[in-house]
Amino acid sequence: MEAVLASGIFDRAPLLSRFFVYICEKYFAGKADEIKEYTIATEALGRPPDFDHSQDSIVRVQAHRLRRRLKQYYEGRGAGHELRIEIPSGQYAPVFRRVRGIGSPAAPPPVAGAVHQGRANTRRWLLAAVTAAIIVTAGATIQLVVPRDSTSQADAVFARSSASEPPNAIRIASGHEGIWFPDNLGRIWGADRYFTGGRRMATVLPEELAGLSPKLFSAARVGQFEYAIPLEPGLYELRLYFADIEAKPPKDFDILVNGEPILQFVDIAGDAGGKSTADVRVFTGLEPAADGRLHLSVARVDGILHGLEILPAFEKGMWPIRILAGQESGHHDSAGHFWSPDHYYRGGRTSLRSQCVSGTPDPNLYLGERYGRFCYVLPAAPGRYRLRLRFAETWFKPGNPRGSGSGMRVFDVVCNGVKLLEGFDIAASAGGSDRAVVKEFRGLEPDANGKIVIQFTPIRNEACVNAIELVPDSGA
């Protein structure tokens, strides 16, 4: 399973990734009989409790796509795998099939995803055998780049997420136990590891976390603790994930890397800027200590951490942020850059369009929009940045009984208190409806909380945006 995820076949398909991991997790837990169309839709694909399969075919469509991608994978890059994962037509539970003539003189019959409830001992044996086989297969297929010592390789998870980030990123879900999981952006998080001290704590989830994975924030490591993460020599980017979701969140704790403070007097509630709000902090230019490990510690008073990421350094600073407003799936543009599903937002509503936008080589970037009164809170390491906002007027156009043309939608855009656009009119700027327009701003710097906050304030009708791009601006 790990080998399939790391192959990149789900890079542009976070829904398929969540579908795939969900059904495998259920199988590993001995709950294959719970893999139903309704549970997949509501627990893996984000459909509401009133999901009706007769009105919504998302599970059947995604299952068809998953079968096709697995078939393509095992016919290509995964052709040498002895153990293969299949989703038989007419069911959603996975089957683990051993292929004759590849590394084994004899092939046992397929291991069905639905194990008979009355054979508990057999099921436990099968789960152990399949899990061991998967670990062996994955270990022979994936290059684990970062760990130095052999004891850490078994629990290290390095998942390929998208073309916007390297395939050997380390993601640790603090306080989480057991198997790893994908987040809303298709990135894979591993269980808690490399730590000493502190304690695990389950946390109460809010309904909204700005498009970030609720599961990541369902547990945390609290107290005074340290992570010692093995790394190859070089520079790295570090991301820390917090959330103000406790009745009395920890306040005024310090975070150190290799003994040097990178955050002091952390106040999650104040830093996040709102209750039940996710907070992400980014740091660049970090490197392992003399012992080959990055030491991250919470000191002075008890603190809390929900997750951490370590990525090899981007050549120009922080890894770029590219967001498709209102869209649930990622997309590669004509230049090969990956745009993530909508996240880091606060407020507003979303809409998807089907018409083609002209004046751009990448009309798919304009298929979704966030509109209303809203903002995006982008985490940023110290430095200067270039911001590009993409717009297209796809609502107020000929045929709309409410009106069309310039003057129908007017709004302001403010970044960290500085007005970037005043009285902005998309249709007037683009020269009509269904036409793309890009506004670029250079030399932007994060605020004292390590954020670039972009506020959209309506003047007439609703403000809106289609896509947001934040990249290091080394020339500013």
Image: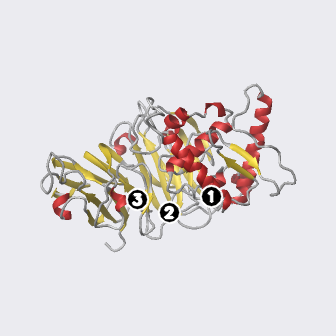
* Viewer-closest of 207 and 445: 207
State the separation of the CA atoms marked 2 and 1.
20 Å
Work out which residue is located at the far right of the displayed protein and give it.
Answer: 105
Q: Is residue 169 visible?
A: yes
Q: Which residue is mark 2?
A: 163
Q: Which residue is mark 3?
A: 321
Q: Residues within 10 Å of mark 3 (few under 14, many from 20)?
A: some
Image position, residue 58 (x, y; %): 48, 42
Work out which residue is located at the far left of the displayed protein and give it.
Answer: 407
Q: Earlier in the sequence, mark 1 or mark 3?
A: 1
Mark 1 vs mark 3, foreground winner is 1
Question: Callout 1, which amino acid?
Answer: Gln
Which of the 4 quarters of the picture holds residue 448?
A: bottom left
Question: Callout 2, which amino acid?
Answer: Ala
- At horizontal 72% and vertical 33% (from top left) the residue drawn is 115
* Viewer-closest of 257 and 82: 82
Mark 2 vs mark 3, foreground winner is 2
Q: Is residue 98 above or below residue 440?
A: above
